[in-house]
Image (spheres, grey):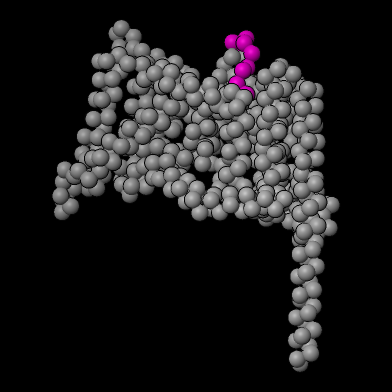
Amino acid sequence: MKKLGTWMESLTDWMTDEFAPRANKVTGNLWVKALQEAIMAVVPMILVGSLITLVSILNNFFSWMPNLTPINQFSFGLMGLFVAFLIPYHVMQHKDFRDRRLVAGMAGVAVFLMLIGPTFSEDGGSITFTFERFGATGMFTSILAGLAVAAVFNLFAKLKMFKNSTALPDFIIVWFDSMLPILLSLLVTWLLVDVAHLDIYAGLLAIFSPLTAIVQSFWGFVILYFIGAFLYSFGMSAWILFPIVYPLQLQGIQDNMAAVAAGHPATNINTYEVLYSGWVGIGGIGATLPLVIMMAFWARSARLKAIGRASLAPSIFNINEPIVFGAPIAFNPILMVPFWINSIVPPVLTYWALSSGLVPIPSQLFQMWYTPFPFATWIVSPGLASMVLLAVITALVTLTWLPFFRAYDRQAVAEDEAEEAEELNAADTAGAAA
């Protein structure tokens, strides 16, 4: 036990002094930050698509309910288009070239539309797009388009065609100053797509297909989730992995939706639906809801009981920052260990159950992560097998938390008693002095 404590202390020091500053430097990078903000900005559109999935459940009971699929298609289904606009927009904003951010965003959309390979009729009177390329499967194309346009605009940001003393209105100056980066962005894209006949969209899918395969594999599913929880236990947000993993998870659920619509089974397990609405993140990353319930109703320590009760309502809705930083779990060796264990066991069991066909793999968009369990699980994968898997995982994570909770509760009680004794001694000393 002493060796474990020493090892945990060394690990904590290294994470705090070495790793965290470097990770924060990466996530604080302007370009990475702009990418994160662009993806976060489209979350409301994804939530609208998720809401349509929720409402569509009523179609199973009421035949008169209308088909709301188009709302899903024109919210979640246009993610790539939105990201292509938002990345250069946010880059220009962070670079303090705010007068060019809208123009840069529009250029990003134009480049993206060229890159996804539309076809024109012989007379040029109509244009045809493959709709799926606008959504999650086109995310990497939109990220490339957005970053490339942002880089060009940033390169030419200091190039001004008019002197500061000119009497021309500012918006006209922006028009002319933006013409060259727009022209260069579109010209290079035209050379690649129409002259060199490169299918950038297909090329990016081929390049990232090994990464997709890794993410959707057993080890990718388990390790990536554990890394997020591991970083979280040291006070670092799991959003560090967000720009890489989230687009692949979105692509995974969109591919599942397309497969089921075509009469084929869903195959992608590493999706947001599986992790945060299905069986893994019960109460949030690390399956912390059982711990909160124990603290709220079983803790002997008044302090832990108060923290548990204050964290209960957020945890039911899968918001576990209050317990992670309030108990705390972060930087607390006693609770970090079960937090890690519960970030490994549920993903392992979930992957096994879904890949073996015992439990249906989710095939509908549902990213309303704040929907309480078990309702969320039933929505993404209705059926008795899904409920049984959730019950088994809940029991296991509860048993994992239990001995560590008891040890921590005993420690907290001892600390509370020591603090009370110290306060009484201080009061007695003050009374004697008086």
Q: Position of residue 271 (x, y in %)?
A: 60, 28
Q: Is residue 16 above or below residue 361?
A: below
Residue 77 seen by the camera:
no
Give 266 or 412, whichever is nearer the viewer.
Answer: 412
Q: Position of residue 321 (x, y in %)?
A: 64, 49
Query: What residue do we see at 57% from left, 28% from top?
Result: 220
Query: What residue do we see at 25% from left, 40% from top?
Result: 155
Q: Position of residue 412 (x, y in %)?
A: 77, 60
Q: Is residue 169 found inside the magenta-colored segment of the image? A: no
Give 31 or 374, whichever is nearer the viewer.
Answer: 31
Q: How many marks?
A: 0
Query: What residue do we see at 80% from left, 40% from top?
Result: 399
Residue 236 seen by the camera:
yes
Q: Is residue 394 above or below residue 267?
A: below
Give 209 or 243, whichever is nearer the viewer.
Answer: 209
Kindly give the residue lying farthest to the bottom in the view shown: 434
Q: Position of residue 105 (x, y in %)?
A: 36, 36
Kindly give the residue lying farthest to the front in the view shown: 3
- Residue 191: which quarter of the image? top left
Q: Quadrant of the C terminus?
A: bottom right
Query: What residue do we see at 16% from left, 46% from top?
Result: 162
- Residue 414: which quarter of the image? bottom right
Start-end of magenta stretch:
261-271
